[in-house]
Amino acid sequence: MSQKVFATKFENVCAVLEKYGNDPHRLVAILQEIQDAYSYLPEDIMAYVATALRVTPGAVYGVATFYSHFTLQPKGKYVIRVCDGTACHVKKASEIISVIEKELGLNEKKKTSDDLLFTLEIVACLGACGLAPVVMVNEEVHGSMNAEKTAELIKKLREEEGRNG
Ligand code: FES
């Protein structure tokens, strides 16, 4: 990592630590803001936080793994959330999950595509059961989905990326 990239990477965490006065009692809030900034909790950043707060890396890691909303893996640009709550499940959400896994080379353990474009999350009720089965791409809700429409959606996002990239 070049020095410039390294410095930029740590700028965010320094600002967050300063905001909370390097107070170890605010660790959860600190990690939350760091995750908002980086979209996940990078290992080297957690080690840096531990040093700054004068706690062990294990203490930081323990908090990061205790709360399910913290993630230690980078997420893709597009987070695809497939609802597998009851209403969506009976309307074949599993077929949607299968097509996404197949299209993106994902599986139960591998949730993010190699190009870091997509992350698949399977979630419980998204509160839009009338639109079942429901898929969300970042903040956008897609209702009445099926495997075919989902494959189309991924294709469209890839094409957009191709145009922008
Ligand atoms: S069960 Fe899927 S939105 Fe409610």
Image (cartoon, grey):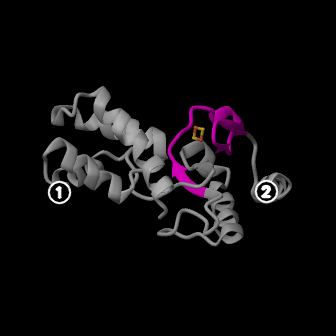
Q: Position of residue 97 (x, y in %)?
A: 63, 60
Q: Position of residue 46 (x, y in %)?
A: 30, 52
| Three-letter amino acid code at the position of disc 1 | Gly
Q: Earlier in the sequence, mark 2 or mark 1?
A: 1
- Front residue of 1/50: it is 1
What element does badge 1 sit on? helix
Q: Nearer the viewer, mark 2 or mark 1?
A: 2
- Which numbered disc covers residue 58? 1
Q: Which residue appears at 76% of the width and 57% of the height?
A: 154
Q: Where ligand 1 lies, by image quadrant?
A: top right
Question: Is residue 137 shown above or below 95?
Answer: above
- Front residue of 39/149: it is 39
Q: Position of residue 152 (x, y in %)?
A: 83, 56
Query: Does the magenta portion include 125?
Result: yes
Q: Are marks 2 and 1 in contact (CB under 8 Å)?
A: no
Q: Which residue appears at 42% of the width and 42% of the height?
A: 11
- Which numbered disc covers residue 125? none
Query: Does the magenta portion include 132?
Result: yes
